[in-house]
Image (cartoon, rainbow, N blue to C red):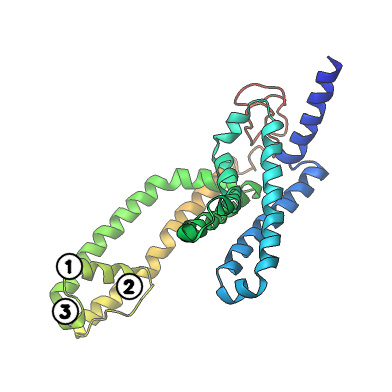
């Protein structure tokens, strides 16, 4: 019994550090983790530059091994510190952690001239580590809820924009001739979308006065259209940040359930809202 308590004690200590950021050690661990995530992404970018990779290949490889070993140990620690490891293994971030850790190992297992392209593709999977940064943003859950609440309005907005693009593109096809680049309705719709979003590649441009007038209208509409989804999400974000009485909603912390790994518990919670386990 005593050995079991000791065993559970060090597991709980690891869980406290890795899964929670409300303690000094937990905050330090998260800071180190964020630093290594950013470092790993920078290493991927530097390795893609041939001149840098040729000159500093050994340094970049050594740093990559340091990062990979740390993430390997982190992954193992996450597995052994919770009561139901498979919950973490098959969770979104569990899959991301695994996929972003294995490429360097795979590059040695699959090494050979015939699979160099595959090895490079595997190593580029390390970019997925940047998705783990979302876990450490305090407003991430509120933003996710705001986007979820806005999806119907944004879908209707996108539908209206597509209809408008089809109408404007068809009009431009009728106004301009093939020499201007408007050779078909789909190509004219492509130009409308590029202009409406203020991207403006410049590969196609109207030549007639009427076409340029219509292009001006589309450009002006573009500025208004860009602001609409931002406003929709901002309103929903404000709703999720403030309650109906204008006061801040109940604050949630970073405490994770040691059983099911659920996060986002209230500060005054004593049990997990998902499985009921004692926190």
Is 240 positioned to the left or the right of 214 in the image?
A: right
Tag count in the figure? 3
Please, is residue 182 above or below residue 35 in the view? below
Task: Tell me the tag on residue 185.
Answer: 1
Q: Nearer the viewer, mark 1 or mark 3?
A: 1
Q: Secondary structure at mark 1?
A: helix
Q: Nearer the viewer, residue 119 or 214?
A: 119
Q: Is residue 204 left or right of residue 224?
A: left
Residue 54 higher or lower than 122, as above or below: below
Disc 3 marks which residue?
176
- Residue 253 visible in the current orientation: no
| Neighbour tally class for label 3: few under 14, some 14-19, many 20 plus, Cα within 10 Å | many
Mark 1 residue crowding within 10 angstroms, few (<14) / some (14–19) / many (20+): some
Sequence-wise, the earlier of marks 2 and 1 is: 1
Query: Where the N terminus falls, by quadrant?
Result: top right
Residue that numbered label 2 is attached to: 195
Residue at position x 16%, y 83% in the image: 179
The answer to whether one can see residue 8 in this image is yes
User: What residue sits 64% from the left and 42% below the top?
Assistant: 247
Quote the CA–CA distance across marks 2 and 3.
16 Å
The span from disc 1 to disc 3 (Cα, nearest Å) is 11 Å
Q: Are marks 1 and 3 in contact (CB under 8 Å)?
A: no
Left or right: where does residue 190 sit relative to residue 55? left
Q: Position of residue 9 (x, y in %)?
A: 82, 27
Q: Secondary structure at mark 3?
A: loop
The reply, left or right, for residue 175 in relation to residue 12 is left
> Nearest the camera: 177 or 241?
177
Label whose residue precedes the other's in the sequence (1 or 3)? 3
Q: Is residue 101 above or below residue 269?
A: below
On the image, the x and y values in percent for residue 163 come to 24, 58
Name which residue lies at 41% across and 64% down. 226
Looking at the picture, how far across and down is residue 200, in whole percent? 36, 76
């Amino acid at each position: 019994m005593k050995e079991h308590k000791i065993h559970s004690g060090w597991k709980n200590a690891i869980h406290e550090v890795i899964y929670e950021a409300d303690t000094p050690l937990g905050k330090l661990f998260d800071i180190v983790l964020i630093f290594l995530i950013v470092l790993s992404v920078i290493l991927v970018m530097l390795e893609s530059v041939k001149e840098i990779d040729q000159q500093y290949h050994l340094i970049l490889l050594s740093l990559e091994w340091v990062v990979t070993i740390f993430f390997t140990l982190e992954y193992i620690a996450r597995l052994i510190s919770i009561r139901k490891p498979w919950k973490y293994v098959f969770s979104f971030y569990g899959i991301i952690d695994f996929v972003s850790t294995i490429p360097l190992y795979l590059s040695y297992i699959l090494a050979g001239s015939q699979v160099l392209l595959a090895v490079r593709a595997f190593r580029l999977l390390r970019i997925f580590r940047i998705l783990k940064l979302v876990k450490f943003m305090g407003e991430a859950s509120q933003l996710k809820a705001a986007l979820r609440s806005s999806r119907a309005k944004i879908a209707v907005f996108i539908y209206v924009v597509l209809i408008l693009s089809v109408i404007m593109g068809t009009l431009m096809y009728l106004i301009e001739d093939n020499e201007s680049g408007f050779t078909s309705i789909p190509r004219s719709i492509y130009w409308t979308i590029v202009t409406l979003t203020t991207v403006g590649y410049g590969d196609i441009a109207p030549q007639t006065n009427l076409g340029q007038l219509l292009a001006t209208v589309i450009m002006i509409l573009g500025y208004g259209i860009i602001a609409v989804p931002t406003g929709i999400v901002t309103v929903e974000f404000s709703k999720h940040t403030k309650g109906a009485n204008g006061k801040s909603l109940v604050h949630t912390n970073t405490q994770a359930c040691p059983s099911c790994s659920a996060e986002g518990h209230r500060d005054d919670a004593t049990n997990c809202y998902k499985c009921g386990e004692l926190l």
